[in-house]
Image (cartoon, grey):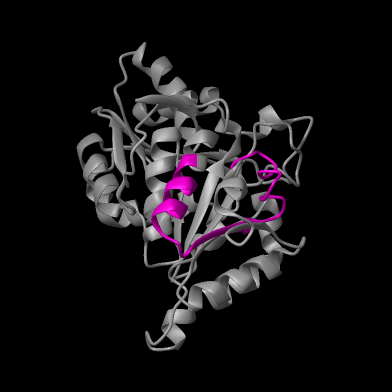
Amino acid sequence: MAQMNLLQAINQALDLAMGNDGRVLVFGEDVGQFGGVFRATAKLQDKYGKARCFNTPLTEQGIVGFANGLAAQGMRPVAEIQFADYIFPAFDQIVNETAKFRYRSGNEFNVGGLTIRTPYGGGIAGGHYHSQSPEAYFTQTPGLKVVVPRDPYQAKGLLLASIRDDNPVIFLEPKRLYRASVGEVPEQDYELPLSQAEVMQEGTDITLVGWGAQLEVMGKAITQAEQEGIRCELIDLRTLLPWDVDTVAASVEKTGRLLISHEAPLTGGFAGEIAATIQDRCFLYLESPIARVCGMDTPYPLALEQEHMANEHKIYEAIKASVHF
């Protein structure tokens, strides 16, 4: 298998999707000849022409509104929002139009072919307008799917599955890993299942749940915990909406403990939904309170970025506190 970074895997997924289905269009700010601000769409316009890979005006609401119209007519648009922080002007289009098209028509029409790609998260010294993790805003919206890959192999398979899924998908790409995460990726076409979590590592003492770039951070904390004889089970949720409750519940029933970690702030973060659901499902199995290690409840800081983030040291201390409760 070829060695690819996360950006190359995404680019290849888009190339395969466009090559196999003439209904797939890729568009957004600077995605054409320039290849996008991170070069995720590099050379796609050269290969497929300006009719299928093209730049849009600088209007996120317009990008998603245009994508809704294309999807409603049977196309499979892949719209890029340049940074997840910029997605908020399109919020009305996404939650009131994209998510509700099928429902309001009684299944007579839908925009299920739409995929919205956007880089998200911190760790690149991007400050408060280029570092946010807005996944929880969309996980409360029935009608959407929310997908987050952790590495190149996952990114390619999950993106191809998202583009071909018959539901609108928000595909959040951890930009800190774009060039930092490198791994083996099959050259051929493949898909990974949506709404199916993956148990990355089995353990007996505590369950850890995360997604995206946070899995790497949690892995470092697990390595520290193992030196003290603590055996952690690590789960990558992969899809946040709808999420795989059964896999997480089965793990917690085995370990008796749960820790959830994400980059987004603690209050209102998706970890709270997971904690509430697992408490309801697994209350009699729990040996300690469910722990959340998340970003701070502040605007994303530039100078104090490392202090703000849920790093491996915070996760390691929370693992010990849970196991020794």
User: Outermost residue toward the top?
Assistant: 227
308 left or right of 256?
A: right
Residue 108 in view: yes
Nearest the eye: 247 or 282? 247
Does 17 lie within the magenta span?
yes
Q: Residue at x 41, y 56 (%)?
A: 162
| Quarter of the image where the N terminus is located | top left
Does 300 lie within the magenta span?
no
Residue 118 x, y percent position in the rendering: 59, 50
- Asked if residue 214 is positioned above or below residue 143 in the image, the reply reads above
Residue 238 in view: no
Residue 189 x, y percent position in the rendering: 34, 43
Residue 322 x, y percent position in the rendering: 39, 31
| Quarter of the image where the C terminus is located | top left
Residue 98 x, y percent position in the rendering: 53, 73
Q: Residue at x 67, y 27 (%)?
A: 306
Locate residue 126: give its quadrant: top right
Range covered by the magenta-colored residues? 12-40
122 left or right of 281?
A: right
